[in-house]
Image (cartoon, coloured by chain):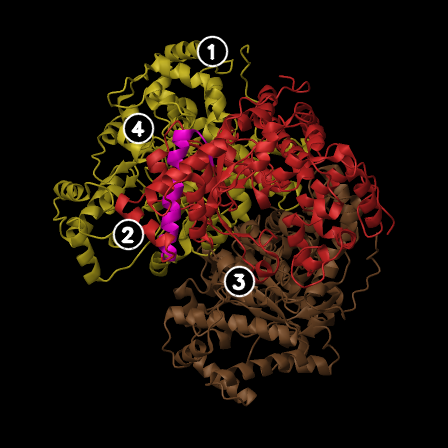
Chain colours: A yellow, B brown, C red
Amino acid sequence: MSEKILTLNPDRLFPIDPNLRALCRSLFSLVEKAPIVSPHGHTDPAWFATNELFSDPASLLLTPDHYLLRMLHSQGIALEKLGVGSGSAKRASPREAWRLFAENYHLFRGTPSRMWLDHTFVTIFGLTQSLSKTTADWFFDHISTQLQTDAFRPRALLDRFDVRYLSTTEGALDDLRHHQTLRADGWGKRIAPTFRPDDVLDPDKSGFSIRLRQLGEITHEDTVEYSGYLRALRKRRDYFIEHGATATDHGPSTPVTASLSEREIHRLFDKCVKDTATVVERELFRGHMLLQMARMSIDDGMVMQLHAGSVRNHNPDLFNRYGPDKGADIPQAVNFVHALAPLLREFGNHPNLTLILFTLDESTYTRELAPLAGHYPSIKLGPPWWFHDSPDGMLRFRRHVTETAGFYNTCGFNDDTRALLSIPARHDMARRMDCRFLAELVSEGRLSDDEAHELIITLTDELVRNAYKLSHIDHTNRQLRKP
Amino acid sequence: MSEKILTLNPDRLFPIDPNLRALCRSLFSLVEKAPIVSPHGHTDPAWFATNELFSDPASLLLTPDHYLLRMLHSQGIALEKLGVGSGSAKRASPREAWRLFAENYHLFRGTPSRMWLDHTFVTIFGLTQSLSKTTADWFFDHISTQLQTDAFRPRALLDRFDVRYLSTTEGALDDLRHHQTLRADGWGKRIAPTFRPDDVLDPDKSGFSIRLRQLGEITHEDTVEYSGYLRALRKRRDYFIEHGATATDHGPSTPVTASLSEREIHRLFDKCVKDTATVVERELFRGHMLLQMARMSIDDGMVMQLHAGSVRNHNPDLFNRYGPDKGADIPQAVNFVHALAPLLREFGNHPNLTLILFTLDESTYTRELAPLAGHYPSIKLGPPWWFHDSPDGMLRFRRHVTETAGFYNTCGFNDDTRALLSIPARHDMARRMDCRFLAELVSEGRLSDDEAHELIITLTDELVRNAYKLSHIDHTNRQLRKP
Amino acid sequence: MSEKILTLNPDRLFPIDPNLRALCRSLFSLVEKAPIVSPHGHTDPAWFATNELFSDPASLLLTPDHYLLRMLHSQGIALEKLGVGSGSAKRASPREAWRLFAENYHLFRGTPSRMWLDHTFVTIFGLTQSLSKTTADWFFDHISTQLQTDAFRPRALLDRFDVRYLSTTEGALDDLRHHQTLRADGWGKRIAPTFRPDDVLDPDKSGFSIRLRQLGEITHEDTVEYSGYLRALRKRRDYFIEHGATATDHGPSTPVTASLSEREIHRLFDKCVKDTATVVERELFRGHMLLQMARMSIDDGMVMQLHAGSVRNHNPDLFNRYGPDKGADIPQAVNFVHALAPLLREFGNHPNLTLILFTLDESTYTRELAPLAGHYPSIKLGPPWWFHDSPDGMLRFRRHVTETAGFYNTCGFNDDTRALLSIPARHDMARRMDCRFLAELVSEGRLSDDEAHELIITLTDELVRNAYKLSHIDHTNRQLRKP
């Protein structure tokens, strides 16, 4: 097979009907060049703090991307051959890994990863042929060369992408040293941490009591005692706020919340610290602490994000060999209606709480999430997440939630990515799919043309800044013309 | 922002493709003006019995509509400011409430409420500008003035809408006085009650034993004894039938059914009356009584409607302040396959039973409801309900159930509304979406043009009259030409 | 109503947009005439072994087809009137049954059965008018006459359909005598059995211990002892392999798997043999044996198919009167993530295991199945099955799984049918829907035209032969031009 030309269809993701397509283009012209606000993601703050050069395409694009690793593993490709792993098995060099990936690039047909990568190849590296076995080395060399230039340093890339705000995600014990460097360098308003305290809230995670002790040392609180533990958590939240955080993030396997009596929680906390709590007690404890996080959010103003419903490390053998985040997290069915009832009973109507819900269980969109968000003032719906951060996933999200929750109980897009270079591609995809959804409503007489032109800006810009309390972000855009 | 022109797109909800649209128009021309048969709804029979004038748009269109209240509440708007509530907080006047609603009308973009209201504004009140902050007073005055004319009295509106049959919904203890007035006035064949006995079947509802006593007084039966209780229920059913009812309606939180032994049910009934039954025992009792309702339906011919899967009053604070039906009912996952097994085992194949199932859990459409309806002679599928009474909801319903259950195990549309003026808009929407679904099948060679033209009449008219045993309703329609 | 012309739209199932339709045609031209490989189905091997003539359309097309029986039963038609049943009730003659079916043929509008039957009428019997009350006798006579000719003998039909491989399904105790005849006649490479051992693995099925004894007699193993039972199962697997089987098939009501200790399984096996095991113990036993099947598959290379989630014989009255497979099997919600964890923990990454998963619970597509298949090397996704073997079902399948699992973790189409004459119609439908899905991706810039042309052949031919280890099948096709 000869090399194929690689181009991006300027009308990609738009429907084929010429009238719908024209409407999509008109809507998209308002947001195509809009700045990027990324309030939730997993890029490494060290990149931006040190601003060092990236080495090669495999280390940058392949080995940290669990979307790619999972698919390659599913087709029987050993992760060592992709340069992953720390065991005794010989790991492939970056070039060898890249070649194997290129040879198997067809596996990604029909997936968003393919679209993100092609977008990256074309718009960031100016590549003009498709990735394949034949072009693997050419890609590797071409990308590696560019990565050695200043224009490809992390901060330069953020400028190029017009990223006005980027949030990273850190554990409760993180010292935020990279964010301190960024503040010292004048980047503090642009890059901020998110407080993700799962490691000190979830007694299921091994090393829980050790981390509680560390939490105590950092905060000078007696964290083997429940009230000291609460004070320590408040201190860490304050510390993150001082470093620019506006949001917390919580990723329990289920969205269970609970409101225990003083006596019960002291008893449970004690058992969790001593690692004698049963499975049910640990879930109750986690649920109680999630509710405390809502209480603290009301006090300190941090937006609360809840990503529930992923069974982490479903493949123990893979976990033992390669560690977490290699694509072995599998969703499970969740029940938000019952699980969130205790929290909502106490704080659901509170004007200071913003609770952003994400799901991996799409059956909850119409059954639970849209009805909850279309009723409770505290609840907003996060964008389609992870496996659903995809064209069809986004369309299903809008089609399932809008009729009940409307647009204004959603909160724009977030890319949730570890893959720095995919950020523009992901926002491009989300904006296109929103244009498409709006264009369809207009074509069916369900929305006026004017409203759609107003809404595309609302969805791209306003809702995300409102939800995440980012009104201070400079988001001016010469291309962003009000209709 | 200047005022926007308000018009209804004559092709609204039809797909944009010109051939599909032409086919939709052709199908729709057969049913656009067809009379309305509304076998399930929640309008107030007092309106029609007294035939008094409505006062103003806020009291008529806003405060009784939980679809509107829930969305406004979700955006932090206090219900008092919308004129709702009976507590100490100062309630807004109708005009103030209307202004606040108008100012926030953009929240309903993309929702069916917006389409129903615009349809009402244009076709019923002849309004020509969009509702907004600017036009709020003009709307209020214009609508209020019209409401003071005889043409806008409840009965005149039913004539104008060409409603040939309208069912209301009443509790088991209702004396049906308004229906008696209606019968005396010659409206008895056109407006009939539906028997909804949840209050005397569900021991979870507070005041259960008090109502049992009332049931005994009304029927002169000893209702603290199980067999007297059964006789009393049969008497109430007969009373409703005498007043024109052809259907019962049941809204338990789960569709559980049960068939208990004589000894067991006597024991359970006793505990429920004395309020000493456990949660599980109360659910079993409810399930057993649902099965008795099926048995009685076989005897007296009433169609049985089952709406399961809504957690009522999920927001206790809101409930305490404003009461029920303010938009705080949230769906939950249900399992019809196991829950209905006891009832179906006894009566599933009985030719006298019609059991119409509604769901708020769309994941049951293909998995449970279509397979059940496509097998059991007793089961029919109700139209998409509540949150799913919407364009996308309707399309999903047809796309999910038709391939397994066909068209003939469904039973037309019902509007299920408390909002009198929305009735024409809702039927218009349902008819358009059925046209669209049929047109798509024709365009894909899955149905002939002739069949689609026959089916649109079947779906609009025949199936609903057959399912609800309304063959006596005059449904002649000059526009209803057989193809 | 006069008789309607019956024709097949050559563009059936393709979207109406002319550009999309042209692309569908181009893709379809590559596979329209491709040979049929049918690796999973329920045709009767006796047909092909004896190669006797079929008698009449009712016995061939109606009475064995549970899709038809269920729909007719759902509309209150007694199965005796369709010629089904062995009780005292008078059964209709084939002609009477056919007439009743024809009269009710409109019930199947919008269902795949209707499309399969019309395809059969036109392409196999050359009929040119629609089936209806008026044409019932003409159909009956016309079809009956043709069925008496050699061209309609079972083997001739397979030739005519260009079926290159057909798998039947047999219980573990089956002597495979028909397959022996087929081998003797040189048809052994073309028709092979599938090993379906539910009857000797599931203690819920009545007669379990009797069948274990039979298993022992056939294999000369002591099957009342666990290790003898395992050896006996291995022997039966080998027997099937000798007769050409490449796959096993498992249809438990839930996909539960378990890995019990030696002591536990001996204890449980003993209780199951003696019929003293509880419901939970029986499920555990079944789960443990499913895991053993995976272990044996790794050893002997048989592909393992798992169809879970159907509640068999939901209608006991119907079952008692007419037996199984009359359309009373109803799906239920399943949880693959937890249920399969024990099996996947042991064998999920094993290169020798191919585990093909089917579901009736579409909510698992994005939530569970695509994430599992997009990660575990052992897992492939079977095509949409049973109620979902339909145009919308197929489209939902591709739209839900492709973005996460890609194309290469799926395994082509299988018809899963008892209805011999529907085989070409079903493959035609599946190929068309794949063309449609691919064309949509191309039109939206998500796939190149070249890739789509390559993929349609991959989906139709390569994936199925790879998944089911059928590389030896001759699949050359003059029409199958590589793009």
Magenta segment: C277-304
Q: Distance between the Cα atoms at labels 2 and 4?
A: 30 Å
Seen at 16% across and 54% down, the residue is A270
Q: Position of residue B284 (x, y in %)?
A: 44, 70
Q: Distance between the Cα atoms at labels 4 and 1?
A: 29 Å
Residue to which mark 3 is pinned: B66
- Whether the residues at callouts 3 and 2 have beta carbons within 8 Å, the answer is no
Image quadrant where one finds the C terminus of chain A: top right
In the displayed structure, does residue A151 sit left or right of residue B220? left
Seen at 79% across and 42% down, the residue is C143
Sequence-wise first label, 1 or 2? 1
Q: Amino acid at mark 4?
A: Asp
Which numbered mark, 3 or 1, is in the foreground of this view? 1
The answer for which chain carries disc 2 is: A
Q: Amino acid at mark 3?
A: His
Q: Distance between the Cα atoms at labels 3 and 1?
A: 60 Å
Q: How many marks?
A: 4
Residue to which mark 1 is pinned: A135
The answer for which chain carries disc 1 is: A
Residue A44's mark? 4
Q: Amino acid at mark 2?
A: Glu
Foreground: C121 or A128? Answer: C121
Residue to which mark 2 is pinned: A283
